[in-house]
Image (tube, grey):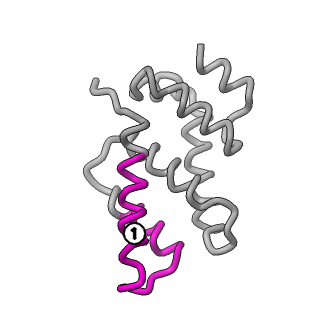
Amino acid sequence: MKKISYMDFRLDVLDDFFLCLVNKPKTDISYDEVLGYVDYHYEEGFSEIELFLVSFVLYVLCGKFDVTSSFSKTLKKNLLNQIESQDFRNFIRQVVDEDRNNLFHDMYLVGLISKDMRDNLCK
């Protein structure tokens, strides 16, 4: 099983997001359209864990902006379905060990997992 680096993958998604924003004046697209473009870019050819990480990074980028509320709700629902699944502990082991705790901490900061769950997953 190939392990995925959360930190590297997060930077890749953020880089794609930034490049799309830089080109925004040329194409005149909205913030939510930029997020949609990045999401579309990762639709095919990626593993389930990579798609989970993309969704998580996009969820963080949605923030609490009104324009992204619908997309944010969809992402949150999908992320929580995965987090609450019976196999989440095994699923998340696909993330490089050194990065996993950073991911759990970030998930805690945005309210997707509780402090107790974070601490339990970090063991």
Q: Label 1 belongs to which residue?
A: 37
Quarter residue 41 falls in: bottom left
Quarter residue 79 falls in: top right
| Residue at (53, 74) in percent of width and height | 31
Q: How many marks?
A: 1
**Position of residue 97 measured from the top left corner of the image (x, y, whole percent):** 43, 20
**Position of residue 77 measured from the top left corner of the image (x, y, whole percent):** 62, 51
107 vs 28: above or below = above
Quarter residue 16 falls in: bottom left
| Residue at (66, 18) in percent of width and height | 120
- Indicate the quadrant containing the C terminus: top left, top right, bottom left or bottom right: top right
| Residue at (53, 34) in percent of width and height | 103
| Classed neighbour count for the residue bearing mark 1: other residues with Cα under 10 Å, few (<14), some (14–19), many (≥20) | some
Position of 121 with respect to 38 (left or right) is right
1 vs 19: above or below = above
Q: Is residue 33 magenta?
A: yes
Q: Nearer the viewer, residue 63 or 70?
A: 63
Give, as a single range, the part of the protein colored magenta: 11-40
- Helix, strand or loop at label 1? It is helix
Q: What residue type is labelled 1?
A: Tyr
| Residue at (63, 74) in percent of width and height | 67
Q: Which of 48 and 38 is in front in this view?
A: 38
